[in-house]
Amino acid sequence: MALALASVVLAPAAGAQAQPSFRSSVAPIDPAFRAQMTSWHGGCPVPVSDLRLVRASFWGFDGRAHQGRLIVQRSYTSPVVKALETLYYGRFPIRRMQPVEAYGSSDERSMAADNTSAFNCRGVPGAGWSEHAYGRAIDINPLENPEVRQGVVSPPGERAYLDRRKWKKGMIHSGDKAVSAFAAVGWHWDGYWHSLKDYQHFSWNGQ
């Protein structure tokens, strides 16, 4: 079984309120997890050996610290962990954070559960592989930050969050803590797109 890297414990920034320290670890996909990893299949654009299981602290909707898990391509773990650290100390709330295996590797079920996730070997209609299929994109709080494509809202029924003038818990806005945290590590927010809006989606290349 592959060995996990030692957890990294980072101290909160000066002036931050007392809270548990941010904790993270990065490890190869071990045989036990690989056996249940239905989000990967033959023909995916990245091998399992290039994927890593990231464990990281996040600040929940309940106002408490939690440990979540994401699957990320190994070359992108450092920026993702750094962005999550910034979100944690900024107390940006995340509902839950689990690999899509917890939802049968269904993007629809994961979004409906308001689950923050990264790797999922799936395509984009008419556009080839999603950046999620490479493990270099992350969707945060999908219910509060839906995708709007040609008038279709995904997850469906989340029109309550289409008015982006609102500032409800977990929503992402231009220039806010979430956008700034990922911009600081060179990642892009797809809420800036013009052809469609994908308010939950961050990626290394803006796609």
Image (spheres, rainbow, N blue to C red):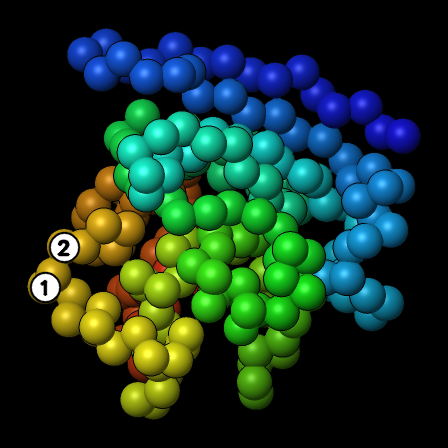
Residue type pointed to by label 1: Arg
Compare residues 5 and 104 and report the one nearer the observer: 104
Q: Residue at x 25, y 40 (%)?
A: 177
Label 2 crowding class (10 Å Cα cut-off): few <14, some 14-19, many 20+?
Answer: few
Q: Quadrant of residue 162?
A: bottom left
| Residue 165 visible, this orientation | yes
CA gap, disc 2 and disc 1: 7 Å
User: Disc 1 marks which residue?
Assistant: 165
Number of numbered discs visible in the structure rendering? 2
Q: Which residue is mark 2?
A: 167
* Residue 140 to residue 186: above or below: below
Q: For the view shown, which residue lies furthest in the front direction?
A: 62
The kind of residue tagged 2 is Trp
Q: Return the residue nearer the eye: 110 or 129.
A: 110
Q: Position of residue 88 (x, y in %)?
A: 36, 30
Who's the residue at 88% across and 41% down the image? 31
Q: Is 109 rendered above or below residue 89?
A: below
State left or right for residue 199 relative to residue 136: left
